[in-house]
Amino acid sequence: MKIISMIPARYSASRFPGKLMQNLAGKSVILRTYEATVATELFDEVYVVTDSDIIFDEIVSNGGKAIMSKKNHESGSDRIAEAVADLDVDIVVNVQGDEPFTERESLAKVLNAFKEDHDKTIDLASLMVEITDWEEISDPNTVKVIVDQNNFALYFSRSPIPFPRDKNAGARYFKHKGIYAFRKQALLDFYHLPMQFIEATEKIECIRYLEYGKRIKMVETNVQGVEIDTPEDLERAIKLWK
């Protein structure tokens, strides 16, 4: 089974433009993420996929592998799908470019989901981490996920799900971590399927898979990490790195 990692990297992020080129302890955020992904030693190849000459040059000039994507894309999945269309690969892992603390344990858990899926019932797999702080649970920047008894995703939302109508019901809340592993065909299908109403409303790309009947296996991890979405996140990451 050939497994590669693709790191989609846009320069113009809406909330924090140029965040991937910000300095994180002497190296850019995107280079830190690339190096962390390579260091897991889980992949046959690791690429950064970008529409930015600046990011492309940053990776290549530091000995890494990068691919220029040809078009503007709605999502990271679309960007990766374009890049892998002609590659001979079985599983494609999307690591977000703003995840410099990417580590082996969580990625290995995601890949194991496919290794144990002998009947090929999984189209893609992703990570979730339990959250208990109500401020984070209710934060619309935190995407939550609910799952069935076999840990297949039922729904993703920026709202608290499930809603705690009975405060004593003992609900557990899980944050979706933006690492995906796809069967190549599921990724190519995504590329050709138009965005539907719910995805457009929530602005969460993995909802498109659910709307078209794909099955997403969620794997629980205890590793929080730091996703760099804001300047404050970058400050936290710098402190954590030190």
Image (cartoon, helix red, strand yellow):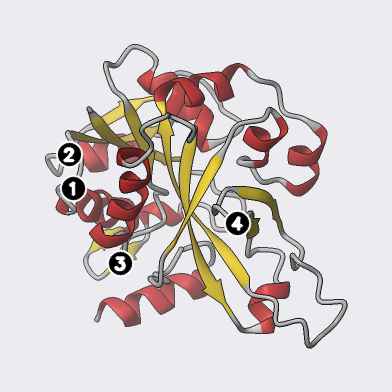
Residue 149's disc is 4
- Of pointers 4 and 2, the one earlier in the residue sequence: 2
Q: Which residue is mark 3?
A: 24
Q: Is residue 209 above or below residue 62?
A: above
How far, Cα to Cα, is label 3 from label 2?
18 Å
- Of pointers 4 and 3, the one earlier in the residue sequence: 3
In this rendering, the label closer to the viewer, 1 or 3: 1
Where residue 168 appears, x then y in whole percent? Answer: 78, 88
Residue 176's disc is none
Q: Residue at x 63, y 54 (%)?
A: 148
Q: Are marks 4 and 3 in contact (CB under 8 Å)?
A: no
Q: Check disc 3: other Cα within 10 Å, few if <14, some if 14-19, many if 20+.
A: many
- Of pointers 1 and 4, the one earlier in the residue sequence: 1
How far, Cα to Cα, is label 4 from label 3?
40 Å
| Element at label 2 | loop
Q: Check disc 4: other Cα within 10 Å, few if <14, some if 14-19, many if 20+.
A: few
Where residue 7 appears, x then y in whole percent? Answer: 36, 41
Q: Which residue is mark 1?
A: 38
Where residue 66 appears, x then y in whole percent? Answer: 27, 32
Q: Mark 2 is on which residue type? A: Gly
Q: Mark 1 is on which residue type? A: Val
Q: Can you say which quadrant of the picture contains the N terminus?
A: top left
Q: Can you say which quadrant of the picture contains the C terminus?
A: bottom left
19 sits to left or right of 75: left
Q: Residue at x 77, y 81 (%)?
A: 169
Q: Mark 4 is on which residue type? A: Gln
In this rendering, the label closer to the viewer, 4 or 2: 4
